[in-house]
Amino acid sequence: MPRKKHYEIGLITPNSLKAKRKRVIRCLDPKCGLKYSVKDYTILYENKKLMYFDASSILVKSKAMICHDCLFKHILALSGPNKIAKVVIVNPDNKTAKVCNFYPNKDKGWLKENEEDGMD
Ligand SMILES: [Zn+2]
């Protein structure tokens, strides 16, 4: 059983962007730059197609707003190839936290994992 590492990451919800009067969201990873209007992000987010995260706990703060693909890459780079990384994702809208396990060899299963937990 691989050892687990633990990280805490903030979810960037469409509501939190609207509260800050943002109109666009862009992944700050220099290799990615994935950009959407907040309007489009709201739709993608609600359909669980896309999530952005505030990863300032693991990255330089000015570059910490990243998309889920980049978060996955960064977490795996930190945790190493054979370890399961335990990531606590905090939702700023309702202050709930959900725990996702990042498996090195699986792709996006973690996005849908434990969906029901902590959402009541
Ligand atoms: Zn990205």
Image: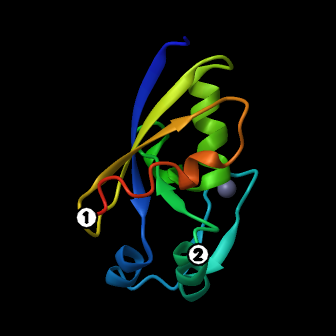
In the image, taking residue 47 as reference, residue 99 lies left or right, namely left
Quarter that holds the N terminus: top right
Q: Give me the C-alpha separation between circle 2 and circle 1.
A: 19 Å
Q: Secondary structure at mark 2?
A: loop
Up the image or down, 113 lies above or below 76; here it is below
Q: Residue at x 47, y 20 (%)?
A: 4
Which residue in the protein does label 2 denote?
47
Report crowding for label 2: few under 14, some 14 to 19, many 20 or more residues within 10 A (C-alpha).
Answer: few
Q: Residue at x 25, y 64 (%)?
A: 120
Question: Residue 51 in the image: x percent, y percent?
Answer: 55, 63
The nearer-to-camera label among 2 and 1 is 1
Q: Residue reaching furthest front?
A: 116
Specify the quadrant of the image occupied by residue 6: top left
Specify the quadrant of the image occupied by residue 21: bottom left
The mark tally for this picture is 2
Q: Nearer the viewer, residue 116 or 103?
A: 116
Q: Residue at x 46, y 36 (%)?
A: 58
Q: Nearer the viewer, residue 47 or 67?
A: 47
Q: Residue at x 61, y 37 (%)?
A: 74
Q: Is mark 1 within 8 Å of ligand 1?
A: no
Question: Residue 44 in the image: x percent, y percent?
Answer: 61, 76
Question: Residue 56 in the image: x percent, y percent?
Answer: 42, 45
Report crowding for label 1: few under 14, some 14 to 19, many 20 or more residues within 10 A (C-alpha).
Answer: few
Up the image or down, 109 lies above or below 23; here it is above
Which residue in the protein does label 1 denote?
120
Question: Residue 16 in the image: x percent, y percent?
Answer: 35, 74
Amino acid found under the numbered disc labelled 1: Asp
Up the image or down, 39 lies above or below 103; here it is below
Q: How is this picture coloured?
A: rainbow
Amino acid found under the numbered disc labelled 2: Asn
